[in-house]
Image (tube, grey):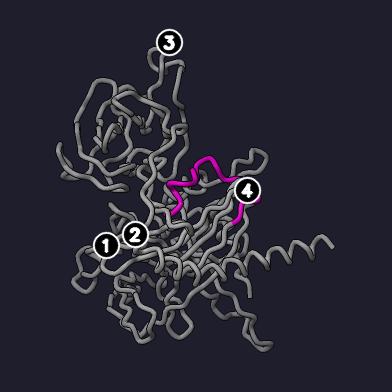
Amino acid sequence: MPEAHPPQRRRHITRSLLFAAGGLFLTAAALAVVQPSAPPEPAFQARQTLDLPPLNARSDQKAAPYIASTRIRRGDTVSDLLNRLGVNEDGLLAFLTHDERARSIYKLYPGRTVQAALDDQGRMVWLRYAHTPGTTVKSGVDSAWLEVRPADGGFTARERTIAAVRETRIAEGEISSSLFGAADQARIPDAVTMEMVDILGSRIDFLKDLRKGDRFRIVYDAYMHDGEEVGTGHIRALEFINRGKTYSAVWFQSGQKPGGYYDFSGASLKGAFLRTAIKFTRISSGFGMRMHPIHNKWVGHKGVDYAAPSGTPIHATADGTVEFIGRQNGYGNVIILKNFGKYSTLYAHQSRFAKGLKKGDQVRQGQLIGYVGSTGWATGPHLHYEFRIDKRPVDPLAVDLPVARTLNAADRKAFKTVVASYQPQIQLMARLQDSRIQVALE
């Protein structure tokens, strides 16, 4: 039966998940379709499974809990995770960070899942950290997680290990107001939606390119035990139709080489540069001439400004070397990366830098390098981002970014076999959609 959310309860959970965790509020705004006449849907992480009760069911039976889920990001703290989940239990944070029984949460692995169940009063029923999810196709794989529950005015924690089975799921969504709204309708976990953004981030600008009617079809993993989902797996393949253009992705790994996502033609989706250094934000000032907000005169703006709350993580848009890190005139706290060849990037007005980062360090694409602030000549918190070619600033939103290399000839045969295993599932979804459209027109 479709999942449902009573209107009052949905508003309550939405407030607790969005306003207690401002980052997800920005998520909805950032991934909203460019459609001025319709406001974007809020990012809603909670879900509740409602089954039809038997005819003789008692009216005082407890409702099934609402489940909130989030995937750990680089730089996250336990407090960050609780905020995103909407969990606000007195003493819980202290318990998690000091009790020996909860020691597995001391180390947070980016990409792993944390879930919380909330009752109809917003109180925590349980908290689960899937620190060791099953990772192979075979059944009988151990999947381990930490489970924390309220007990005797405090909390108790224990490790649970079960045999998990990987299931392959397929889903399809159509965007009407926001990416997360479409994913919610398709019952796709938010963690999978986030991964889809990461995979296609070098091809689609999810800040401004989404349109009503865009579609996506996706094949992903889920880990199950006794019919219950105990962990969210990764995306295996996907197809995203944006503005009439089709983008594809499939996971491929050859032997002991690092795996990665490639389009169906074999081109790597790890572009040489990401389009943006902040995942969820809005553009507050573009490249070119503008009236300077402090000096009140027309000047050339050498970068793009991204408005975001102070403390929002900033990520390197490409591999590179830290050429400068420190304070520099109007830029305030700034990092300049020498990327490769003739390319360099600049990240200004930061509140602080990533811990331990120094001049000469090597950074990888997507690595945390600092946090949004308002140091230097700034009227409010934002990131000033410059993309330079031969030390000359160019518009990062208009320039043709360098692309990564394609697969070599030796791997192409194996790659085609992988693509062939997923394409029929995606094509089936497309045919079913065409049939639904045809029936609707008749």
Q: Nearer the viewer, residue 52 or 238?
A: 238
Q: On the image, numbered disc 1 is attached to which residue?
A: 108
Say whether disc 1 or disc 3 marks the residue closer to the N-terminus: 1
**Amino acid type for the residue under numbered disc 4:** Gly
| Percent of width and height locating residue 92 | 30, 64
User: Looking at this view, is 215 or 93 the one in front?
Assistant: 215
Mark 1 and mark 3: Cα distance apart in space: 48 Å
Label 3 to label 2: alpha-carbon separation: 44 Å
Residue furthest to the top in view is 297
213 left or right of 240 in image: right
Given the image, on which type of amino acid does mark 1 rest?
A: Leu
Residue 16 position in % (x across, y down): 47, 55
| Disc nearer the start of the sequence (2/1) | 2
User: How many other residues sit within 10 Å of disc 1, few (<14), some (14-19) or many (≥20)?
Assistant: some
Nearer the N terminus, badge 1 or badge 4? 1
From the viewer's perspective, tell me whether residue 199 is left or right of residue 253.
right
The mark that comes first in sequence, 3 or 2, is 2
Q: Is residue 206 magenta?
A: yes
Q: Secondary structure at mark 3?
A: loop
Q: Are marks 2 and 4 in contact (CB under 8 Å)?
A: no
Mark 3 / mark 4, whichever is N-terminal: 4
Residue 137 versus residue 3 in the image, above or below = below
Identify the residue under disc 4.
Answer: 244
How far is mark 1 from mark 4, CA to CA? Answer: 39 Å
